[in-house]
Image (cartoon, rainbow, N blue to C red):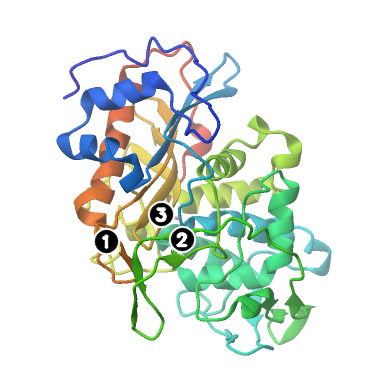
Amino acid sequence: MLRKTRLLSLLVLLPAVQAAAQPKTDKKLQKLIETYASPLLQRVLNAPDTFHYQFIYTRIDRDKNNVPHFTNYYLNVDRNDYFNPASTVKLPTALAALEKLNTMKAAGVDRNTTMLTDSAYPRETKVYTDASAQNGLPSISQYVKKIFLVSDNDAYNRLYEFVGQQQLNETLWKKGYTDVRITRRFAGTTEEGNRHTNPIRFMNGNTLVYGQPPAYSSIPFNYSKTILVGKGHWDDKDSLINTPMDFTRHNNLPLEDLQQIMQSVLFPESVPAKQRFNLAQDDYAFLYRYMSELPSESRFPTYDTTEYFDSYTKFFLFKAGKSKIPSNIRVFNKTGWSFGYLTDVAYIVDFKNKVEFMLTGNIYTNNDGILNDNRYEYESIGYPYFKELGNIIYQEELKRKRKHVPDLSKFVFDYKN
């Protein structure tokens, strides 16, 4: 049980500590977390150069018209401290795919139209069927579902190919996310291969509705900052290389940008118009459902819940120990895990207690300093870090006085249909 009650209830917005090359930290948030931190969490907090953790707590206050207002509080947040975003890049990729799809309505294509992926460059793969779909056929809709339900890598690859590397990055840059860089599929190919994306056919039965030719990305990326991680790594030939792993040309998605992208989808009116994705109301409802649906509730796809348990992709509050998720709580989120890095961006709702807030965080857990050896401390350090931080903020939110009780009906779904 928490021993103190209102450290953040009395919080006034203080400017984050912002010095040159210094991470942003709000002292009141830091004090709250340190007050309730277990020895394990305190160990993490005391070693920022080891665990490279970053954390954002987004407080949400509604006005009398139920309009949400957001206040971000930071702990050790530094966009220049690289972390591998892993599967969190699937979030902006899915949004860009739905946005692109909305430009194709005149051609008769929607997210449920059958999408056949062909190949035109070495190592590209074809996809003509999808056994997880009710009709056995691939579609944008099915790929987006799988991305949010279990973070499916192949689904991400197909959306990356549909949008194309150049359009994907230019879409994000135009929205102001100029530090974001998404350069690769999650599949074995070369840097040049990732610039090439597949030809795609949208079909209605045997009739071609729309054909998308193969694309090539000619945009330059800023690789001026060398990013080296660890003291050694295993290469793709299973050889141990006793030098750091080079992430200079890998994907990049700063934590603040990840938080803003999620906020722009959940609360599009809260961000400038140019920062929003061009989505229809039906797209938003579709996203909200599958961001929050649990693997046990999904029918198409259907999952083995011994492997894909309900907290499989819910790090904050629940992941450690494969916790059961109470029926009054829903988490709308996207996680990522790879190379010892864990990341989660989440909007958490407690319908019973009328509580809502956002949490965004990451941590690096790699005690031996060797990458690609699959010896990371996810279970012993990473997941407990997220669960404990989530619970500290949740307990504070339960106690926090609100001038206006939020109407959360926008986020209520019938997951049985």
Which residue appears farthest toward the right when viewing the image?
A: 106
Secondary structure of residue under mark 2: strand
Mark 3 crowd level (few <14, some 14–19, many ≥20, 10 Å Cα) = few
- What type is the residue that disc 3 sits on? Lys
Q: Is residue 351 visible?
A: yes
| Disc nearest the viewer among 3 and 2 | 2
Residue 280 in the image, given as x and y percentages of width and height: 70, 48
- For disc 1, the marked residue is 376
Spatial CA distance of label 3 from label 2 is 47 Å
Nearer the observer, 126 or 299: 126
Q: In the image, 264: left or right of 414?
A: right
- For disc 2, the marked residue is 228
Residue 44 in the image, given as x and y percentages of width and height: 26, 40
Q: Is residue 317 visible?
A: no
- For disc 3, the marked residue is 416
Residue drawn at (64%, 30%) of the image? 270
